[in-house]
Amino acid sequence: MPTAADRRKAANALPPLADADDAAIERFLDAAWAEHGHAPATLAAYRADLQVFARWLQSRLPVVTLAHAAREDLFAYLQARAELGYTPRSGARLLSCLRAFYAHVLRLRLREDDPVALLQPPRLPRLLPKALSESQVDALLQAPDIETPIGLRDRAMLELMYACGLRVSELVSLPATAINLRQGVLRVLGKGSRERLVPLGEESRHWLERYMQQARPALLVGVRDPSGVAALFVEAGGGAPTRQTFWLLVKRYAAVAGIDPARISPHGLRHSFATHLLNHGADLRALQMLLGHSSLSTTQIYTLVAREHLKALHARHHPRG
């Protein structure tokens, strides 16, 4: 699989983006946001995928615009990516982007044929979410040094993510107004700008109260107007931590907790939240609402994880397992 450096090198070798292609991409992104409410991260991924394809196309056929690429051009591009070592999952994401773009082009009647119509998505292996055991989660949550403001903040972030099953982007972008400690609920703005209410739980509520009373004011010392800082979780000086920051701190605390950092990611806490709820008898429909999934089929993957857990328990403890 190509590294980020390989991708940058390949992209830099392509010609600059043509004005017509740039305008077409921006029109598509505006429509995608207005019609479907896609998250900024999704729109950014669409923009990057389309820009690289448009520049690759121009390097081969300078007179052909992105909107008028032929089916053969798409085949050739996907084949070139495969030869560079891109994964099937990356190809599936790109194909989803191209389907959306050319559906938009057809709606505008800029062409009559759909070049994506006969392209088949690559077969993807069914990957089960990787969840930590309950004892591993306990060890991870206790890893931060709560005697420091940053450590207390990190403990509150980890507790909240595990208690509420948040996505990383949802966690780091939470405004302070999203939390109602008196009622014990959290208002989350998820994918597609869909809002959901999630109960906090006693432990996460306790650590959030400590963070809000002790660590957050300490981190905002020196900020001219602390009341104007909207983010719930802050760095020293008032800025909000990024997804990359949270990724690194999860890896660091995993090492402290004796967990192989290669086996854990921030999203793993969301997987653990869902898996542990199912193992303790949670209803699948309720889990869908807590996770903010638009489709129950997305949530059903966790039933496979729970089933594998039960099979492992049976094999380990049954006298004829």
Image (spheres, grey):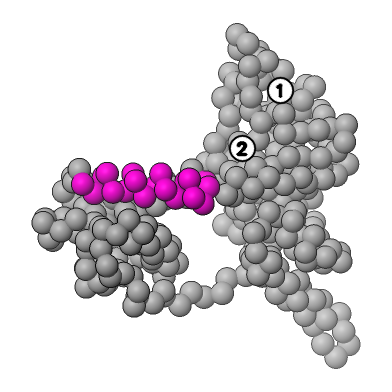
Task: Identify which amino acid the numbered label 2 is placed on.
Answer: Val
Instruction: Give the percent coordinates (x, y) of residue 114.
Output: 31, 69
Q: Which residue is mark 2?
A: 172
Query: At x 81% / y 28%, what residue is drawn?
Result: 210
Residue located 34% across and 46% down the image: 27
Q: Residue at x 31, y 48 (%)?
A: 25
Residue labelled with disc 1: 216
Q: Is residue 238 above or below residue 98?
A: above
Q: Check residue 22 for magenta coloring.
A: yes
Q: Amino acid at mark 1?
A: Arg
Numbered disc 1: secondary structure: helix
Residue 132 in the image: x percent, y percent? 71, 59
Name the quadrant of the C terminus. Answer: bottom right
Element type where label 2 sits in the image: helix
Q: Residues within 10 Å of mark 1 (few under 14, many from 20)?
A: many
The numbered disc on residue 46 is none
Start-end of magenta stretch: 20-39
Q: Position of residue 67 (x, y in %)?
A: 25, 57
Question: Residue 139: where, in percent of width, then height?
Answer: 76, 49
Characterize the magenta stretch by its predominant secondary structure.
helix
Near-viewer residue (62 or 309): 62
- Reply yes or no: does residue 28 show up in magenta: yes
Quadrant hosting residue 142: top right
Question: Is any atom of residue 171 visible in this view?
Answer: yes
**Going by the image, does 25 lie left or right of 269?**
left
Q: CA distance from mark 1 to mark 2?
A: 14 Å
Q: Quadrant of residue 154?
A: top right
